[in-house]
Amino acid sequence: MVSRTQRIENMFIEDGFNILYISRTHESTLEWLATHRLLIPSTFCSNHEDGNQIMSKIQDPTKADSFKFRCPVCRSTKTLRWNSVFFGHKLTLMEAVQIIFYYFIFQIPINQVSRQLKATEKAIGKLYSKMRGIVSLYIEDLKIGRSLGVSTMDDNGNQTIGIVEIDETLVTHHNGDQMWVFGIFDRRTKELWCWPVEDRTAETLIPLIVSSVEPGARIYSDGWASYSSLAQYGFEHQVVLHVNGFGSGENTTNGIESCWSELKRLMKHSQGIQVNSNDPIGSLREHVNLGIWRRSVQHEDAVESLVSIINTYYA
């Protein structure tokens, strides 16, 4: 029997080989980018007060991308990459497509990509960082206006209470300090929401729970003292004492414990967790959200999912 991990890797390999074939030439790369709306067909010229003058795409063999945008009135030009995820990067479009939709999905180390593509580690790292930020923003936006642990109605009109599991886990260290992530797992939807936290006090964790979990939901947790007041906020709180394991039957936190194992594997695969010293919480959030996205695409096309995310922010 093929394991879930192997199924995920097989999916990435299949998609990856397609991308390597698609990006084999400049022409095939441009065609794929246009089909997936990753390069805009036209834009507006900023030199005109009304803002309605369209710049058309024209051929220019002197440009690396073979095309540019030009205003027919004032003759000003813009790069073909204007208002796209590739803007500001000097890599060829073939290289950029391979990095984003193959190497980034595989989470292949930057130094290895540099050797294979003969591109600088700085340029590759810049794209990796950009994609982590876009995926992280997408995962955060998915939470807006939603809650976990929402109750449902069965066919007979009976209400079924929503159930979530909560926990914190140590994921890495920075300057000698432990860096923790708090998570909420919804048993019905299998969603996992996470937040890097500076501490595990009730003052930090309770607001995250109250703002993210449907009032009246049942919450399973371990015996961490910070959770002791949850019943005061209208939740049905069940404690699973880990001295006896992670529980059994419904009285368990096995769901979120399993998520932690999977998430850490997805985060640490090949590269490890590289925390930015200037913003350790923010950079850890990006790594965590990238792991959550990787977890969520195990049953769908990872390349198409990433295309959709990019199109969300680069219309």
Image (tube, grey):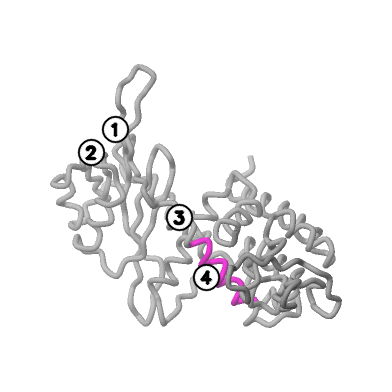
Sequence-wise, the earlier of marks 1 and 4 is 1
SS of the residue under disc 4: loop
Q: Residue at x 52, y 61 (%)?
A: 135
Would you name the residue on which mark 1 appears?
Answer: 161
Residue 55: where, in percent of width, then height?
71, 68
In the picture, measured across the screen, residue 24 lies left or right of residue 207, that is right
What amino acid type is highlighted by mark number 4? Gly
Q: Distance between the residues labelled 3 and 1?
A: 27 Å
133 inside magenta stretch:
yes
| Residue placed most toward the observer, 22 or 162 | 22
Q: Which residue is drawn at 68% across and 50% down?
A: 10
Quadrant of the snapshot with the C terminus:
bottom right
Q: How far apart are marks 1 and 4 (CA)?
A: 38 Å
Task: Indicate whether 238 appears above or below 193.
Answer: above
- The answer to whether the residues at label 1 and label 2 have Cβ atoms under 8 Å apart is yes
Would you name the residue on which mark 3 appears?
Answer: 261
Residue 141: where, in percent of width, then height?
44, 55
Q: How far apart are marks 4 and 2 (CA)?
A: 38 Å
**Numbered badge on residue 272:** 4
Q: How far apart are marks 4 and 3 (CA)?
A: 14 Å
Residue 304: where, in percent of width, then height?
65, 51
Would you name the residue on which mark 2 appears?
Answer: 216
Magenta-colored span: 124-136
Comparing marks 3 and 2, which lies closer to the viewer?
2
Which quadrant of the structure image shows residue 51? bottom right
